[in-house]
Image (tube, grey):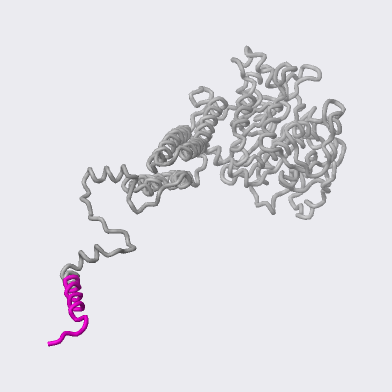
Amino acid sequence: MSKRPGGDAAERGRKRRAPRRAAASDTPTRDRETQPSNRAPKLPRAPRTPAFLARLQASGGPRFARKMTTGSIIGWTALSVVVPGAAHLRAGRRRTGLILLGLFGLLLLVGLIYGLSFVGNYGAAARDSTMITVSAAAVIGALCWFALVLTSYIALGPDRLNGRGQIISGIAVGLLCVSVMAPFALTANTVLTFRETVKAIFPSTSDPEIQPIKEADPWNGKKRVNFLLIGGDAAGNRTGMRTDSMNVASVDIKTGNTVLFSLPRNLQHVRFPPSSPLAKHFPNGFMAELPNGGLLNEVWQFANDNPQIMGGKNKGPKALMDAISHTLGLRIDYYALINMYGFVDLVDAIGGIRLRVEKDIPWGGHYGTAGTIKAGFQRLSGEEALWYGRSRVVDDDFGRMGRQRCVIGAFAQQATPDKILTNFGEIARTAKRMAQTNIPQELLEPLANLALEVKDARITSLQFVPPQFYTGSPDWPKIRRATVKAINDSLKPAKRALAAGVTASPGTTSSPTSSPTATPSASRTVNPSQTPTRNGQSAANNASAKSLSELCGF
């Protein structure tokens, strides 16, 4: 039989290829392993023994993670500040990362619950226990976040970077540590400064002259509380303390509505209640037997200079409170004094005060040579505010009193919490040097809540100045009747408030006997540019009711 040409060669080729096909069909797995592929080879799964985990950790994390760069290490470390555990999760330390994340969530929940406990009782922030808790928490928080930043940085393996990357990332993380600790340190310092200021200014109820404070009823059942606000003019070139500005803030505890009573410094021959030692010493009034003496602003210093009469040292505040209580027919509960030169620093610390200046006020010395505060709406610096309240160049003492109460009212309304916190250090230092009070520390919590009510409430004002009230020969019953009427009017709705005793401009007074039928249109009869009423000017046209905000334009 003849064979086809090339048949033997073809047969031999088929025989050689057959084993390959057979092998391919018999061992498919081995054939796929030998064939080239674009996919990464599948490694056998190693047992997750402690030795394996240690090797995995030493290698820098799971194999699927991208190689960490300098920027990514810095970025993930920074992210861990706001999301604790993020850097550990990125580094493959899932358990540690989840634990940190859970602790952070728990911390936020606790902080939220603690913060909500102050809603409706913001004065609780003034508690000594609250201040200690917040300052301690701030210190612990600073240490914890410092440790968090460092451990997050180390977990990301900065040692695998080159020398330059290690230096850059180390400097960046160091700055991050300082930045993270700064807010905590500022918080702790502010709270501790506030606590020190409170202890330096406010006495404790352990003082025998301070009435104990009941936690359930801090105001002891009172519907009103009366504060004597004093501006003193003690200075290095003056002897003793003269109470240059004296105002009584009578506050309704429920509504916060306040009546501000201004007493002239030259009110003569004030009387004292029978319980005061000065009542026996001056039965006809303070220094009535002396010519041209017996001014109200001399009571404080006289009591301090004569401890043998008062029965002890530093009885000036009590003597002045007794005199003003008897004059108004109101019990003065507490007093607060601030040196008027220290007031300059307080006004500057909040960025000045804004009010309406009725007319040009020259200031500086007896002739106003330092400058002029122009009429109109102005923002006054501390020095300008002081001189605005003290200048006598174009006004008498009564016009000056009107300006002083505008300064006090403007400061009370414009010293907002954000301004106080921003400049708290300077305010605290000034207050410790210049402030004095008998308000006990334990009353700060309810007092802070009351202050928030006053900020949004109506403030009216009554000045005991001529022509309605003559300072040389005061009509004491008339003063007391006007006081009662002004308080009663303050309890009425704003649209029905009467004009009795409420001034229409910083230096004017309205008659306490004004007709109760005064119409709202009467309140528009006062021109903003009108000058303060002088002693001989009739007050008939000034019988309009206005709040202190309207009077002073703040």
Q: Position of residue 75 (x, y in %)?
A: 47, 46
Q: Position of residue 490 (x, y in %)?
A: 66, 46
Residues 179 and 166: in front is: 166
Going by the image, does 9 lie left or right of 161?
Answer: left
| Residue lying at the far bottom of the rendered structure | 1
The quarter of the image holding the C terminus is: top right
Decide whether residue 12 is among the magenta residues: yes
Decide whether residue 390 is among the magenta residues: no
Evaluate whether residue 39 shows in this view.
yes
The quarter of the image holding the N terminus is: bottom left
| Residue lying at the far top of the rendered structure | 308
| Residue lying at the far front of the rendered structure | 2
**Which secondary structure class fits the magenta region best?**
helix
Going by the image, does 80 lie left or right of 289?
Answer: left
Q: Position of residue 453 (x, y in %)?
A: 59, 44
Instruction: Name which residue lies at 22% across and 49% down.
Output: 48
Picture layout, residue 256 above or below residue 28: above
Q: Quadrant of residue 510?
A: top right
Instruction: Name which residue lies at 54% across and 31% down.
Output: 194
Q: Quadrant of residue 366?
A: top right
Residues 57 and 204: in front is: 57
Evaluate whether residue 112 shows in this view.
no
Q: Position of residue 289 (x, y in %)?
A: 77, 17
Give the total of numbered labels. Answer: 0
Residues 477 and 128: in front is: 128
Picture layout, residue 322 above or below residue 444: above
Residues in magenta? Answer: 1-20
| Residue lying at the far left of the rendered structure | 1
Going by the image, does 441 lie left or right of 331?
Answer: left
